[in-house]
């Protein structure tokens, strides 16, 4: 009865009532998800799992093995192996019936409601969820572009870049110099660069204790700064030098051929140079025409884009308000989006949007810290409601418990994405 | 005496309310222009004038800006641990001289709670962005925490619980495995409800759980309990 009425409304409302009309045309409603990370894998899994076969879910992801960016710093520090952070999509296909397509999405026709793939196929959708992560802003670090990523790796998309950076750190000469060019706001994982420095320092302290780490940073302050600086002093005293904007950190150029970094006129010879450029939404969001500037503005209530109610953007690529760009955030946003998309396509109950995030960082062995917050949807944005952050001077037992908790979270979120 | 007085004032000044935005920043800009701008600057290039500049105000210690000469009263409050957040600023702006009797801020106060919320929403724009520095102050007002005695009698809506549980399952594994974060699967509903309220009331000490439980109402906790009690992996 309800279905008939909806179909009737859909037919009379002409072009606007697309989902149910399309669904009627080909049987099951179709959801296409682009990007199999914390946002996309979670959205695909929840929609397929909770709709119990009522929705046809296709996940498009080029990589057969997905390496999580979260915990990739722990691989650099020697706390995890590369296999520990690698995951495959078999569970999504066999446990929940997700059609996993390993290909690149290269275009979106929002009028025809299709996604085109590099392999030539065209995939139709009723609802499209883009969770493409980040790409880099051309020219943000003068002298660096993607062709320089082997000489000066970013390692800000996990996998071969992370392995390359780890190999370069291992090959540093005794007393050598590691330079990080830190990114401007907003960027993926606010504490990430500083956890990375901690992990590199941990590694160097064991294998190359006279080595130096220099951070050139355009930002006057950063996430968990007091906690990191306390930890660096305690564990790695004298090894790490932070050059903020007061010391020229916002005026940096690099020469990947000569392996030099120019910080406001002072030329540093680097043995390893980790350039983390300014970021923007993954390219498919731009190709779909749902970005405004570098990011895709979305409605907080369901993560639908401001540009198109049938196209959703999750995670790092979205511009949503107060949530940091993190795997936890993307996973949280994916569940709100999945609930809303399922409701729109099958009439299932839609519940109020609630979001949360926690970012754990490891400073040294058993010295873990965290910051977290809860959020909710307002008309304007996702707004922060409450939060907490680890305190300086916490005792060793609490820091150890915090690290163990982060391992529990990693097991939990990866099961929530891939199982 | 003052140490006792301040918490009472805060309790009075921030009534229990449903979660919502701090206020209307656009209207706050108008209030700032008419009420504050004679003495204070905020935004790009702001510097200290008669009053201190207000960039990065949220999270700043009272009397904590280098290069500005504060009254002894505010400097002492800062040394005692007073920080400027929504609740403290709200109480201060309501009536500065009552909040800190020796303050040099010659301002009689903004009596309308809605106007104060608007003004603070405007000033909040010039503090750190929580998207980039997640530990920055909230931009929305949280739900008030109270526990009714009848809570154990509430029959949970397991379907709503399943949706809410998706947030728990980011860390707690559905199959009940404990890899560093304890299992919550198949707990008796009553034990679950009691534990969640203990977090909500900040009796159990974990900060993540205090935060997560803190924004769930009684029905939502009952819904989660109903779902986890019957969850089959």
Image (cartoon, coloured by chain):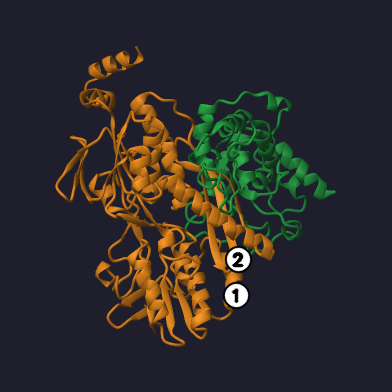
Q: In which quarter of the image is residue A338?
A: top left
Chain letter belonging to callout 1: A
Depth check: A328 or B122 in front? Answer: A328
Residues at marks 1 and 2 on the same chain: yes
Depth check: A125 or B78 in front? Answer: A125
Instruction: Categorize mark 2 by other alpha carbons within 10 Å: few (<14), some (14-19), many (20+).
Output: many
Depth check: B136 or A69 in front? Answer: A69
| Residue at left offset 27%, top offset 53% | A62
Question: What is the display colour for chain A?
Answer: orange
Q: Quadrant of residue A112?
A: top left
Give left or right: position of A198 versus A306: right
Does dot 2 land on a helix, a strand or a loop?
strand
Does dot 1 land on a helix, a strand or a loop?
helix
The residue wearing badge 2 is A367
Q: Can residue A219 be seen in this view?
A: no
- Residue A66 at what x, y percent from top left? 35, 55
Which numbered disc, 1 or 2, marks the residue that appears first in the sequence? Answer: 1
Give left or right: position of B108 versus A222: right
Question: Residue extending furthest left?
Answer: A120
Q: Is residue A404 visible?
A: yes
Q: In this view, does A201 lie above or below B53?
A: below
Instruction: Report the chain shown in green.
Output: B
Whether tag 1 and tag 2 are in contact, CB under 8 A, the answer is: yes
| Residue at left offset 27%, top offset 72% | A148
Instruction: Categorize mark 1 by other alpha carbons within 10 Å: few (<14), some (14-19), many (20+).
Output: some
| Residue at left offset 34%, top offset 47% | A90
Depth check: A73 or A316 in front? Answer: A73
Give left or right: position of B211 versus B72: left
The residue wearing badge 1 is A235
- Residue A163 at what x, y percent from top left? 37, 69
Give left or right: position of B176 versus A159: right
């Amino acid at each position: 009865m309800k279905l008939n009425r909806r179909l009737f409304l859909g037919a009379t409302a002409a072009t606007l009532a697309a989902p149910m009309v399309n669904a009627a045309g080909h049987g099951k409603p179709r959801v296409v998800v682009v990007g199999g990370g914390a946002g996309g894998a979670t959205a695909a899994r929840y929609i397929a799992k909770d709709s119990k076969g009522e929705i046809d879910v296709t996940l498009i992801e080029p990589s057969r093995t997905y390496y999580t960016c979260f915990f990739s710093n722990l691989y650099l520090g020697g706390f995890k192996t590369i296999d520990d952070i690698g995951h495959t999509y078999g569970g999504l296909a066999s446990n929940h019936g997700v059609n996993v397509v390993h290909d690149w999405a290269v275009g979106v026709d929002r009028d025809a409601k299709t996604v085109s793939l590099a392999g030539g196929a065209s995939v139709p959708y009723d609802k499209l969820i883009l969770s493409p992560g980040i790409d880099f802003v051309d020219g943000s670090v003068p002298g660096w572009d993607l062709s320089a990523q082997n000489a000066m790796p970013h390692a800000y998309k996990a996998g071969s870049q992370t392995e390359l950076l780890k190999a370069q750190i291992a090959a540093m000469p005794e007393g050598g110099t590691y330079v990080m060019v830190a990114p401007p706001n907003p960027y993926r994982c606010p504490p990430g660069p500083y956890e990375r420095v901690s992990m590199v320092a941990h590694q160097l302290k064991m294998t190359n204790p006279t080595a130096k780490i220099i951070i050139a940073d355009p930002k006057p302050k950063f996430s968990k700064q007091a906690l990191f600086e306390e930890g660096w002093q305690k564990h790695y005293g004298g090894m790490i030098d932070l050059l903020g904007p007061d010391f020229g950190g916002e005026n940096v150029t690099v020469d990947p051929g000569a392996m030099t970094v120019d910080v406001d006129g002072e030329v540093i010879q680097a043995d390893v140079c980790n350039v983390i450029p300014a970021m923007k939404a993954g390219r498919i969001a731009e190709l779909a025409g749902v970005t405004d500037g570098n990011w895709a503005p979305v409605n907080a209530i369901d993560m639908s884009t401001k540009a198109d109610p049938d196209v959703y953007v999750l995670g790092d690529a979205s511009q949503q308000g107060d949530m940091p760009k993190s795997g936890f955030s993307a996973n949280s946003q994916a569940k709100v989006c999945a609930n809303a998309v399922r409701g729109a396509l099958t009439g299932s109950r839609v519940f109020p949007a609630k979001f949360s995030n926690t970012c754990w960082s490891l400073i040294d062995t058993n010295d873990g810290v965290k910051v977290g917050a809860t959020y909710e949807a307002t008309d304007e944005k996702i707004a922060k409601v409450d939060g907490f952050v680890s305190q300086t001077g916490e005792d060793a037992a609490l820091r150890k418990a915090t690290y163990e908790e982060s391992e529990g979270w990693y097991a939990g979120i990866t099961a929530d994405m891939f199982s | 005496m003052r140490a006792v007085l301040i918490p009472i004032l805060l309790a009075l000044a921030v009534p229990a309310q449903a979660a919502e935005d701090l206020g209307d920043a656009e209207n706050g800009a108008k209030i700032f222009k008419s009420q504050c701008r004679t003495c204070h600057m905020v935004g790009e290039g702001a510097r200290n004038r008669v009053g201190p500049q207000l960039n990065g105000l949220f999270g700043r210690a009272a009397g904590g800006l280098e290069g500005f000469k504060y009254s002894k009263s505010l400097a002492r409050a800062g040394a005692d641990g007073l920080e400027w957040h929504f609740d403290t600023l709200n109480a201060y702006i309501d009536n500065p001289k009552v909040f800190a009797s020796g303050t040099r801020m010659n301002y009689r106060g903004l009596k309308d709670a809605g106007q104060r919320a608007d003004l603070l929403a405007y000033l909040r724009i010039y503090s750190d962005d929580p998207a980039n520095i997640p530990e920055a102050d909230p931009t929305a007002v949280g739900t008030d925490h109270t526990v009714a005695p009848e809570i154990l009698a509430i029959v949970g809506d397991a379907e709503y619980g399943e949706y809410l549980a998706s947030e728990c399952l980011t860390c707690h594994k559905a199959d009940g495995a404990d890899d560093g974060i304890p299992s919550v699967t198949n707990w008796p509903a009553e034990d679950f409800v009691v534990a969640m309220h203990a977090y909500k009331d900040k009796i159990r000490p974990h900060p993540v759980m205090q935060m997560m439980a803190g924004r769930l109402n009684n029905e939502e906790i009952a819904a989660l309990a109903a779902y986890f009690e019957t969850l089959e992996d």
